[in-house]
Image: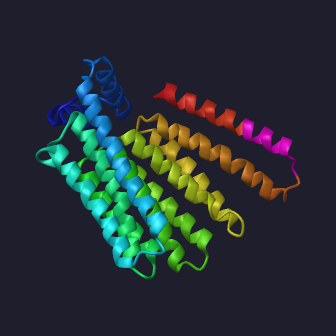
Amino acid sequence: MAMTARQDQALHDLTTRGVLSADQESAVRQALEDTGAPRRVADLITELAAYVGGGLVLGGAALLLGLSWEDMSRLTRVAVLAAATVLLVVAAVVVAGGPVRAVAGLRRRVVSTLFSLAVVTSAFTAGTAVSSREFVVGATTGLVVAVVAYLLVPTALAYLALAAAAFATVIAWSTEFAADIPLVVGVALFVLGLIGALLSLVDVLRPAPLALAVGAAVALFGAQQPLGSNAWVTYSLTAGLAVACFAVYLTVRSTVLLVAGVVATTVVVPEVVWDLTDGAVGGGVLLLVAGAVLLATSLVSTWLRRTR
């Protein structure tokens, strides 16, 4: 059942006031979708056509450039990519049929998909237009477009496009100027993940469970990057993430935090054991340690849930 913008906001207000948790809000949305009236065949065809059309625009531009890249001038390449971007944006506006922020239901999903594809083409357009630091320029441009797209239509797909653009931008800027790339990239991604998780907790990024899960995953991925010459930085960041997840769970009812805390703990403890023993322990011992840690953290998480 498609929800109007006012219904969507009313449901979200219940979460803001503490009547529903973020997980409960997602469950209500899913229940409404599952019990709604069957969608009309015409609506399904329209939605499918929009998805396929957007994909063909992106794929066609990629194929054209791939086959003729060496024969094209830079201006021609930019023109092709820019035309694809404009076509996707215009299609999204036409599908919206009015103010983009007020679009709901099927049209909301289609508009979000077309905008997300435009994020990709705009990034490649900007990167192709310059002769140096293409990755930095392209990723940064994609991030700007992704932010605008998310503000206009804050869907799960728009958030994923925003998260991917932010991830690419952090890597681009970090690798461009860093002397110790693994350390700088790792710390930058760790901070990015924490910021994303925090923004989801204060209800800036939605859907909150997805944003929280992605933020925790990015933070964990970043924490693991300095492993090697900066192993203890990795251990500190990963252990800090685990502690933070368990601590925040005491005030925020989200199973995502428990899962993230369990995973981070299970990853860092065997790493520390391996380092402290200079690799003297065998794979079986590490497997035993990992299993024991996983069991212990699972018991702790169960106790926390029951306590709450």
Q: Nearer the viewer, residue 294 or 5?
A: 5
- The residue sitting at 27% across, 54% down in the picture is 88
Q: Nearer the viewer, residue 49 or 191?
A: 49
- The residue sitting at 49% across, 44% down in the picture is 247
- Whether 246 is drawn above or below 268: the answer is above
Q: Residue furthest left?
A: 98
226 lies left or right of 82 = right
- Quadrant including the N terminus: top left
Q: Is residue 4 magenta?
A: no
- Whether 173 is drawn above or below 92: the answer is below
Residue 70 visible in this rendered orientation of the protein: yes
- Whether 56 is drawn above or below 171: the answer is above
Residue 232 image point, x, y percent:
68, 63
Residue 167 image point, x, y percent:
46, 60
Residue 30 image point, x, y percent:
34, 26
- The residue sitting at 32% across, 36% down in the picture is 48
Q: In which quarter of the view is residue 144 placed?
A: bottom left
Q: Is residue 285 magenta?
A: yes
Q: Nearer the viewer, residue 169 or 133?
A: 133
Residue 245 image point, x, y percent:
51, 45
Look at the image and give the residue range highlighted in magenta. 281-291
- Whether 200 is drawn above or below 138: the answer is above
| Main secondary structure of the magenta stretch | helix
